Amino acid sequence: MKEWLRFLIPLLATIALLTGITSFLVSKTSQSWFERDVALRSELAVNSARASVLRAWNLHDSGALRKQLEEITRDTRIAGAGVCAPGGSVAAMAGHSGLGIDCARVLALRPAPNDQSWHGAYPGTENEHFSAVPVHEGGIEVCVVVIIHDMTYAERRAALTRQFTFFALGALAITSSAITILFLRYVRRSWDTQIRRLLRGEGARPEFQPLRHDVQELARQLSAEFESSEHWNADRLRSVLHRHLHGEQIIVLANREPYIHERRSDGEIELVHPASGVVTALEPVMRACSGVWIAHGAGSADREMSDKNGRLQVPPGENLYSLRRVWLSQEEERGYYYGFANEGLWPLCHLAHARPMFRATDFRHYSRINARFAAAAAQEGKVRDPIVWIQDYHFALAPQLVRKKLPAATILTFWHIPWPNAERIGICPWHKELIAGLLGSDILGFHTQLHCNNFLSAIDRFLETRIDRERQSVFYQGHETIVRPYPISVEWPNSWAVAAPDVSECRHALITECNLKQDAVIGLGVDRLDYTKGIAERFLAVERALERFPELRGRFSFVQLAAPSRTEIERYRELSSQIEQIVERINARFGRGTYRPIVYHRAHHEPPKVFQFYRACDFCYVSSLHDGMNLVAKEFVAARDDERGVLILSNFAGASRELSSALIVNPYDLEEASSAFATAVTMSSEEQQERMRAMRQTVAKFNVYRWAGRMMMDTAGLRQHTRLLSRYGDRD
């Protein structure tokens, strides 16, 4: 229908304009014709009565003049007639209803002193017209005969002419529209037929041959069975990228770098793999995809280990992709990262008990660093249309900035944390700038459909845009952004799990390191030290379990790996102090001798060590108060190839929607959480196996390669569509 309207509306508008112009011209032309007609008839009537009029005039016989005038006025369309003397007096007059003749006014309308007749609208009337015909004798004008015509009939005929013109052109418009629609239907069917022939590999008309390769390639992409994700792994991802994005350059923008060089107190340089969900998700993808990873060089020895442009090849010894480090001053890092990103956006997006802080100076730093990373992406772009993959809340402004520098680039943005509702995001003074920045993306991904819905609602409330709810896309400033849920996951098969020792060896190492009994029941928590992770609530649940189940005392220990995070922020320092006080209090209350209910490790642990802890524990508790996904839950499942162990998972973590076989709890409900501890401790090996097997199947199917593959497949389809449009135009 849209296609038809594009033709019909201009056509009908043109015909309507022509109808108006034609009606006006026809009316004027008809009026001119009628006036010319009555003038000629008046001259004929006077010429036929000329002799009689002269004779009566010379005899001064007004009765004879009136009789001649009455003969003229027998025509029903003549309203009156009169004979005017040269001085302007009325010599004789006749007419219907006794119409008077104002000879003086008629003679005054004479164009010039000459012997020609003249005519025009009779003064003081609407539908009456006069013709004045001079009568001569011997070359001298004797008198003037004035005839008044009733032009009502002419107006009726003009109206009929206009009606005829209107209906004739209306019929033309209807006929033209019908022909246009039929033609469009024919063209559309012809296109459909030819495209089907191309898809089947059959011959098509010559004008369709240039489309053959592109249409068939697009069909191959769409037919790729990437949803059968049990086969998604690094090799398949590389195959998909080679098949659908061959030769395309991929640039990743992320705040956190995958490898950090730190100088130890002894002067040696140590390579650190940071505890970050983004790094956990992206590093296997970059190994498979190659490309460039642009990140903040935060390590104390990062500059030494990079070239003059901040570049190096990683992983060390494998050199699978490039790392480009961007340098920030302490002030910039304080304003951009610790300030706006983590004192502002982080608590704003998480429904945890921390007040967001927004300072204009922090936002200026945030804007400046976003622009610097966008410039770095433009520098690293070796082609005019690279794929730029922007990560997380640190770079909400970057998509629009990258688009300005690389207008042909395909920009993907993935928001790794929750997106709040419109009322909450409106708290940020620069919420419109953040939303507009994200709309520079071609594809914008969130963990869940709820976060997508929240984002679309925020757009609808704060920006003038067009939202296609069915397609889940936004049109802003002439650009379309597709909004999709892409639940993130972990590597499968997991390289850290594969490289880890067997379960018994891992358990022995953990018991020895933490000085636990051989028959200890071990719970595990693995987190960054962050108020959204619910670590304090977790320890209070441990305390409540020991209160409710005395049989656990002396035997049950909860091991917590807490990586220090954002120590520049006061709220995080307060949290660290608060948690240490809780640990000391609980250990003092229930500890005896060497027994500690809570074994608290406030330190960074490398992935190999973390995965050994996963394999050694009896259960893992993820108590997030609000989390976009939480990959710890999925890492724990990936580590348990023995199909043992229990996952206790907060219902406020996005992972709870996928890992439904876990024990789902409300971390604020200490009774429910402590009961889950008791359930995990007493759960039979058969039930553990059944639950863990179901979760492992889910993580295996929906792994990080599938996450990246879905985004890359959508990117490939989008790029193919864009190239088709640029080559052949939009024919929809």
Image (tube, grey):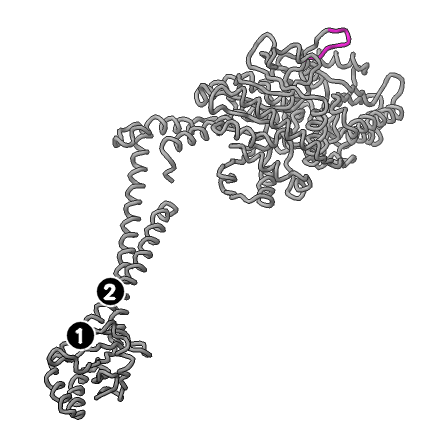
Report whether 199 appears left or right of 397. left
Q: Amino acid at mark 2?
A: Thr
SS of the residue under disc 1: loop
Q: Nearer the viewer, residue 72 or 653?
A: 72
- Can you tell which quarter of the image residue 355 is in? top right
Q: Nearer the viewer, residue 494 or 405?
A: 405
Q: Position of residue 519 (x, y in %)?
A: 78, 17
Is residue 81 placed above or below 681 in the rendered structure? below
Amino acid bearing label 1: Asp
Residue in the image at 72% along x and 36% along y:
358
Query: Would residue 11 appear left or right of 70 to someone viewing this image?
Result: right
Is disc 2 placed on a helix, strand or loop? helix
Q: Position of residue 282 (x, y in %)?
A: 59, 21
Q: Is residue 427 visible?
A: yes
- Quadrant where the image shows the C terminus: top left
Query: Which residues make up the magenta segment?
Result: 261-267
Going from the N terminus, do you reach mark 1 or mark 2 first? 2
Q: Judge whether residue 70 is colored magenta.
A: no
Q: Quadrant of residue 510?
A: top right
Residue 262 within the segment the image draws in magenta: yes
Q: Vertically, is 491 above or below 454?
A: above
Using the image as rendered, state which of residue 591 and residue 553 is in the foreground: 591
**Residue 681 visible in the snapshot:** no
Mark 1: few, some, or many residues within 10 Å (few <14, many ≥20)?
Answer: few
Q: Which residue is mark 2?
A: 29
Q: Are marks 1 and 2 in contact (CB under 8 Å)?
A: no
The residue beneath circle 1 is 115
Q: CA distance from mark 1 to mark 2?
A: 27 Å
Q: Nearer the viewer, residue 715 or 501?
A: 715
Q: Identify which residue is drawn at 62% across, 28% down.
A: 370
Q: Position of residue 229 (x, y in %)?
A: 51, 25
